Image (cartoon, rainbow, N blue to C red):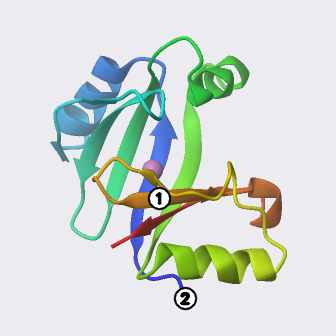
Amino acid sequence: MIGRLNHVAIVVPDLGAAVTRYRDVLGAAVSAPAALPEHGVTTVFVDLPNTRIELLHPLGSDSPVAKFLDRNPDGGMHHVCYEVQDILAARDRLRAAGARVLGDGTPKTGAHGKPVLFLHPKDFCGTLVELEQV
Ligand code: CO
């Protein structure tokens, strides 16, 4: 059911420092920051030949990644995003298999303007999983 790895997301305490690290030290192509108020994050995408890295920084007072930074002050890996062809069919299949879909199961619009859902880390080897319809 899942397809390509769309991105790996990393929460960073300092977005500017993270951009410098990826662009100037690692020599990667890095996007401009984009604010996603609906998700409580500012994102920067690092384009790699075979996938992307999503740098996440808290936006607003109740950002879901603020708690992550409290527990991991240096930042760290936050989620992996797999592509699916039909996100509602994927959601229904996962629920039928007993996996927990976060929120009310209604896809939100993700960083690329496409529908996304998140799956409970306890059901996927301790890793938060994002599904993005492509
Ligand atoms: Co993501």
Helix, strand, or loop for circle 1?
strand
Residue at 39% over, 37% down:
55
Question: Residue under circle 1?
Answer: 116
Where is residue 125, by image quadrant? Answer: bottom right
**Amino acid type assigned to the residue bearing label 2 in the image:** Met
Question: 126 or 104: nearer the eye?
Answer: 104
Location of residue 65 with respect to 78 vertically, above or below? above
Where is residue 35, by image quadrant? Answer: top left
Question: 82 or 49: nearer the eye?
Answer: 82
> Residue 131 vs residue 17: left or right?
right
Question: 19 or 45: nearer the eye?
Answer: 45
Q: Earlier in the sequence, mark 1 or mark 2?
A: 2
Helix, strand, or loop for circle 2?
loop
Question: How many numbered marks appear?
Answer: 2
Residue 90 in percent (x, y) is at 58, 79
Q: Which mark is residue 124?
A: none
Residue at 64% over, 59% down:
105
Q: Quadrant of the N terminus?
A: bottom right
Location of residue 123 with respect to 121 vertically, above or below? below
Residue 57 in percent (x, y) is at 44, 25
> Residue 66 vs residue 28: left or right?
right
Q: CA distance from mark 1 to mark 2?
A: 15 Å
Q: Is the residue indicated by label 1 positioned so its CB lies within 8 Å of ligand 1?
A: yes
**Amino acid type assigned to the residue bearing label 1 in the image:** Val
Question: Residue under circle 2?
Answer: 1
Residue at 68% over, 83% down:
93
Neighbours of disc 2 within 10 Å: few (<14), some (14-19), many (20+)? few
Question: 66 or 109: nearer the eye?
Answer: 109
Residue at 74% over, 56% down:
120
Q: Nearer the viewer, mark 1 or mark 2?
A: 1
Residue 66 in percent (x, y) is at 60, 21
